[in-house]
Image (spheres, rainbow, N blue to C red):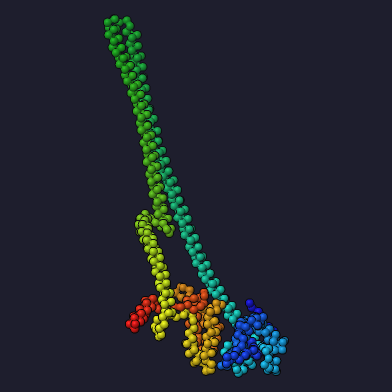
């Protein structure tokens, strides 16, 4: 939680940062040949109302020095607690000035906030402060906080700018795609309109052709039928008039020859009767011919009508076929200008490709099934290998072999020997104690789940965590203790983040010390067999 710095009489006073308090005259006693005193946890409980992060008793070769360092949080809340710590001791008469004046060896502790004079002082207090802190004013810390805030704001502004550019690019692509799609839809509408217009013109043309052909056939029938009818009527009228003329002539002949001799009259009457019968028979025959002509005319008219209907059917079929052809041509024309459609040949190819694609899908399903089976087998084998690896690790713990190439390494744990060698290069006094304390301190820091000095980067399109070298603690570590100790601690950090990031405690692993890498199961088994043969020969 961010808080404003407390008002001070002099903002240029230099304090030790991270905020630290000094405790002196901590009760000690001589025991077993050295001075001993209360532990840091007991002192932390006594000062719990000031919310200290840690209380570190200071030791030397004689034991407890009677001094301790109280560490507070790095934020302004920690500074507030440190000032409250100092004001409380001053109010009770056990502040810094009181200590300088009294210098007595009673049981009461004295305390104050560590400042520049404490930082520069000689002795265990000054040594600890110089190793673990820096001198900074409140103004310096405010400026650093402002710089970090400005840097964060600048980074966020850059990210926002990058995101805005990406959004603009996406909008541009979207607009281009939308424009292209609108253009394609417009072309499609134009093609459909042109096709419909051509289809309408063609249908109208066929209808006109059909109507004209039908009218020509009907007109020819209408013209031909009256002619036939008139011709037959004229012939019948002529025959009727001829019959009437013959009948009148016979009657006149009868009247004129009534007084002739009976023989001659009888012969003449027979001839006329014969002629009359002949004329009647001829008239009957002509009437039958007329009836036959009428029937034939009806039949011919029906045949003509049947031909007209057949022509109409043929014309309709032809019109339908031509219309279908025109529609297919229009569809093909539309297919050429529309993505996803195809002509007849392309459709055949697409059908063949679809069958081949289906075969590929079947093959893919078979391969997926096989892959699933292999994954299950691999998982089972991996579980068995992990179990064998655990058993080997447990066996290596009981197998005491010095200077072996293959062994068990606790990943994420600092090597005390390597740490001590690195400390000897930088320290001259109390190397073992200082090395042990420093090693213990950083082991606790590595186990701290709230400290995660890693950042996520993209490597080969995959998110990976890498060590953040600009972390405050790591920068202070490198600056104060050098590259070698920095390398040991960062190596342990990387190992703990890889092998146990959630629990953050060291885990055992088979290790090839000769090549400095994780040992394979084969190497571990070969090493165990080698040790077993050696042990067998010795027996």
Point 52% across, 74% down: residue? 502
* Rendered view: 330 above or below 250: below
The image shows residue 114, relative to residue 447, as above or below, that is: below
In the image shown, does 288 or 440 lie closer to the viewer? 440
Q: Is residue 488 left or right of residue 232?
A: right
- Closer-to-camera residue (443/479): 443
Q: Quadrant of the N terminus?
A: bottom right
Where does residue 526 sit, x and y in percent of width and height?
35, 78
* The C terminus - image quarter: bottom left
On the rendered structure, is 211 left or right of 134?
left
Q: Residue at x 65, y 90 (%)?
A: 25
Residue 460 at least partly seen: yes
The part of the image, by quadrant, that contains residue 351 is bottom left
Q: Is residue 126 left or right of 185 when viewed as pictured?
A: right
| Quadrant hosting residue 21 | bottom right
**Residue 140 appears in the figure:** no
> How far across and down, in percent of the image, does residue 324 sit?
40, 48
Q: Residue at x 35, y 55 (%)?
A: 348
The percent position of residue 23, horizontal first and vertical second, equals 64, 88
How many numbered discs?
0
- Give the residue displayed 37% in from the left and 79% down from the top: 528
From what the image shows, is residue 328 above or below residue 268? below
Is residue 516 positioned above or below 302 on the image? below
Measuring from the top left, give residue 465's x and y in whole percent.
49, 76
Q: Residue furthest front?
A: 539
């Amino acid at each position: 939680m961010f808080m404003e710095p407390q008002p001070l009489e002099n903002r240029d006073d230099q304090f030790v940062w991270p905020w630290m308090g000094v405790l002196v005259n901590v009760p000690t006693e001589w025991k077993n040949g050295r001075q001993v005193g209360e532990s840091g946890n007991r002192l932390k409980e006594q000062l719990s109302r000031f919310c200290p992060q840690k209380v570190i008793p200071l030791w030397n070769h004689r034991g407890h020095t009677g001094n301790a360092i109280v560490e507070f949080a790095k934020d302004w809340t920690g500074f507030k607690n440190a000032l409250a710590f100092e004001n409380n001791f001053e109010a009770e008469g056990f502040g810094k000035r009181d200590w300088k004046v009294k210098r007595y060896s009673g049981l009461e502790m004295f305390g104050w906030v560590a400042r520049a004079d404490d930082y520069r002082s000689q002795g265990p207090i000054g040594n600890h402060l110089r190793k673990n802190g820096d001198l900074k004013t409140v103004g310096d810390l405010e400026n650093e906080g402002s710089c970090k805030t400005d840097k964060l704001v600048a980074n966020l502004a850059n990210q926002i700018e990058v995101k805005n550019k990406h959004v603009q690019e996406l909008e541009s692509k979207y607009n281009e795609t939308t424009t292209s799609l609108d253009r394609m839809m417009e072309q499609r509408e134009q093609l459909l309109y042109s096709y419909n217009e051509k289809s309408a013109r063609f249908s109208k043309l066929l209808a006109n052709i059909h109507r004209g052909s039908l009218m020509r056939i009907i007109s020819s029938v209408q013209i031909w039928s009256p002619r036939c009818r008139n011709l037959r009527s004229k012939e019948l009228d002529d025959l009727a008039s001829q019959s009437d003329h013959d009948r009148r002539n016979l009657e006149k002949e009868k009247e004129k020859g009534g007084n002739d001799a009976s023989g001659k009259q009888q012969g003449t009457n027979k001839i006329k009767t014969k002629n009359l019968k002949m004329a009647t028979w001829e008239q009957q025959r002509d009437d039958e011919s007329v009836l036959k002509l009428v029937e034939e005319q009806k039949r011919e008219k029906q045949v003509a009508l049947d031909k007209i209907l057949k022509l109409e059917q043929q014309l309709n079929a032809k019109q339908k076929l031509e219309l279908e052809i025109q529609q297919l041509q229009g569809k093909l024309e539309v297919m050429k200008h529309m993505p996803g459609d195809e002509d007849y040949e392309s459709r055949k190819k697409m059908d063949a490709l679809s069958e081949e694609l289906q075969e590929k899908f079947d093959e893919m399903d078979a391969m997926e099934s096989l892959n699933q089976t292999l994954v299950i087998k691999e998982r089972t084998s991996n579980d068995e290998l992990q179990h064998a690896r655990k058993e080997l690790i447990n066996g290596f713990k009981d197998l005491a072999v010095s200077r072996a190439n293959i062994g068990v390494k606790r990943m994420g744990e600092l090597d005390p020997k390597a740490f001590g060698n690195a400390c000897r290069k930088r320290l001259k006094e109390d190397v073992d104690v200082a090395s042990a304390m420093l090693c213990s301190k950083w082991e606790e820091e590595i186990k701290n789940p709230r400290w995660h000095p890693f950042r996520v980067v993209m490597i080969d399109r995959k998110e990976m965590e890498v060590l953040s070298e600009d972390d405050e603690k790591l920068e202070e570590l490198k600056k104060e203790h050098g590259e070698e100790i920095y390398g040991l601690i960062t190596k342990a950090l990387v190992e703990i983040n890889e092998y146990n990031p959630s629990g953050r405690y060291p885990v055992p692993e088979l290790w090839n010390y000769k090549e400095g890498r994780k040992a394979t199961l084969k190497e571990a088994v070969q090493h165990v067999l080698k040790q077993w043969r050696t042990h067998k020969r010795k027996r």
